[in-house]
Image (cartoon, rainbow, N blue to C red):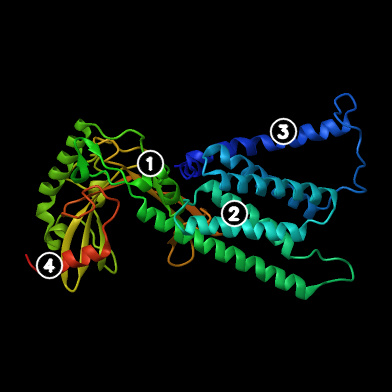
């Protein structure tokens, strides 16, 4: 999956109007300049021009504040969250636009911008941290824009004869602290949304051929958005529920997988079949790969799953499920169960520094000096009677530990 596709997957559909408006912002600025300089199209009497062109700091501040203004003014078009929140968006957007003009014209803008930026960042963190809003790419990009302007506000410009070292040091420290705090909360919110926004669409939870979908998923129909920030690229969910045929196909796949993998209940048998135990090889979510099965050209074959998942602890192992993996990244996997059999991929960051890989930053990108790589699509099928169903993205760790304590098989048994 390309960076553009990854970015698109991580965008909440309700925020698409914001991107359209941002794309039109340069056109609006160019048109405004032509109006001010061309007497044939001038709408108002000529206004006094600034004594000098704005410096780099003022130019950056004006553009970034303008971007923040567009985002807040257009957000209510995507979704209406009540008159109070709509008024807050429109008020913040108007204030950002006013401050952008002041920055461009050389009038005071730092104090007002810092106060407004602090208020909107806190409001965003409260909304995402409290579960009212998922951190999507538009929201995170807007937070980055606001943090950049906040840095311009806090760090004074160095002038000849006035180094202002202490003020610049404190301003820089404040900027770094703000970035760290905002990033940490976005990261935690992204992983929490990734865990909580799972749509319950397993055959065990399907009633009358129509899968049950949680109220949270209905209220936030972009449950895939936060997962993108958590390094998980979910294929966007279909709006329609699964059909009776799709529920039956998903149930058949789950049953066939459980029957075919029964021979791997003993970990020694899985190792003998070519599955490789990673290091350290213990935990509640140990993935064993079979490299031969990954290159055999067979897709979604219960007899030859590309990975097995075990809980291994205390000298005992419990087979939990399998992971079907596509051979090539970017190639979509088949969905016999429709929205029930939903595939996902992972964004990882490759680096020359130990341990050689990592996950995306809270702002949806890889750290410096690292390379972003998207894995082939994969899908879990659990062969245990978990409360989350056969096609859940993951199993509750506490439940796995209790199940393993009761059903674990000694790893030395044959």
The answer to whether residue 378 is visible is yes
> As drawn, is 406 to the left or to the right of 336?
left
The residue carrying mark 2 is: 143
Q: Is residue 237 left or right of residue 159?
A: left
Task: Describe residue 243's horizontal placement relative to residue 143 as left or right.
Answer: left
Q: Quadrant of residue 254?
A: top left
Res 339 quadrant in image = top left
- Alpha carbons under labels 4 and 2: distance apart: 47 Å
Mark toward the start of the polypeptide (1 vs 3): 3
Crowdedness of circle 2 by 10 Å Cα count: few (<14), some, many (20+)? many
Measure the C-alpha gap from mark 3 to mark 2: 23 Å
* Residue 173 position within the rendered picture, expressed as x and y whole percent measured from the top left: 66, 71
Upstream in sequence: badge 1 or badge 2: 2
Q: Is residue 40 above or below residue 256?
A: above
Would you call the spot at circle 3 few (<14 residues within 10 Å), some (14-19), or many (20 or more)?
Answer: few
**Quarter where residue 319 is shown:** bottom left
Q: Nearer the viewer, residue 270 or 22?
A: 22
One can see residue 366 in this view = no
**Callout 3: helix, strand or loop?**
helix
Q: Along the line of sight, which residue is nearer the eye, 62 or 165?
A: 62
Looking at this rendering, what residue extends furthest in the top direction? Answer: 40
Residue receiving disc 1: 235
Marks 1 and 4, Cα distance to the nearest angstrom?
Answer: 35 Å
Circle 4 sits on which residue?
406
Report the residue marked by disc 3: 27
Relative horizontal placement of residue 49, taking residue 191 as reference (left or right): right
């Amino acid at each position: 999956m390309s960076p553009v596709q990854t970015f698109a997957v991580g965008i909440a559909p309700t925020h698409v109007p914001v991107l359209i408006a941002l794309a039109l912002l340069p056109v609006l600025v160019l048109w405004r300049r032509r109006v001010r300089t061309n007497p044939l199209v001038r709408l108002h009497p000529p206004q006094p021009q600034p004594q000098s062109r704005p410096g780099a700091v003022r130019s950056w501040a004006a553009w970034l504040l303008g971007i923040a203004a567009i985002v807040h003014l257009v957000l209510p078009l995507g979704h209406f969250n009540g008159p109070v929140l709509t008024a807050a968006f429109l008020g913040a957007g108007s204030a950002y636009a006013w401050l952008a003009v002041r920055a461009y014209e050389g009038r005071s803008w730092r104090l007002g911008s810092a106060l407004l930026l602090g208020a909107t960042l806190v409001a965003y963190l409260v909304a995402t941290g409290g579960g009212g809003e998922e951190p999507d790419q538009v929201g995170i990009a807007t937070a980055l824009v606001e943090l950049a302007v906040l840095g311009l506000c806090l760090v004074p410009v160095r002038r000849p004869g006035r180094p202002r070292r202490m003020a610049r040091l404190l301003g820089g420290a404040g900027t770094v602290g703000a970035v760290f705090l905002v990033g940490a909360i976005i990261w935690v919110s992204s992983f929490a949304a990734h865990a909580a926004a799972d749509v319950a669409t397993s055959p065990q939870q399907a009633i009358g051929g129509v899968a049950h979908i949680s109220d949270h998923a209905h209220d936030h129909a972009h449950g895939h958005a936060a997962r993108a920030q958590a390094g998980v690229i979910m294929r966007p969910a279909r709006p329609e529920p699964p059909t009776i045929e799709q529920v039956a196909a998903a149930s058949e796949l789950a049953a066939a997988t459980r029957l075919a993998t029964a021979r791997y209940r003993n970990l020694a048998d899985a190792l003998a079949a070519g599955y490789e135990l990673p290091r350290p090889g213990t935990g509640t979510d140990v993935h064993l790969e079979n490299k031969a099965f990954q290159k055999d050209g067979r897709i979604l074959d219960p007899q030859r799953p590309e990975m097995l998942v075990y809980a291994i602890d205390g000298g005992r192992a419990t087979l939990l499920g399998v992971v079907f993996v596509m051979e090539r990244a970017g190639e979509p996997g088949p969905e016999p169960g429709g929205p029930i059999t939903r595939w996902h991929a992972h964004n990882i960051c490759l680096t020359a520094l130990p341990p050689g890989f990592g996950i995306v930053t809270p702002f949806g990108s890889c750290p410096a000096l690292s390379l972003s790589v998207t894995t082939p699509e994969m899908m879990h099928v659990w062969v245990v009677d978990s409360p989350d169903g056969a096609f859940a993205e993951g199993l509750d760790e506490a439940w796995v530990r209790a199940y393993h304590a009761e059903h674990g098989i000694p790893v030395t048994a044959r």
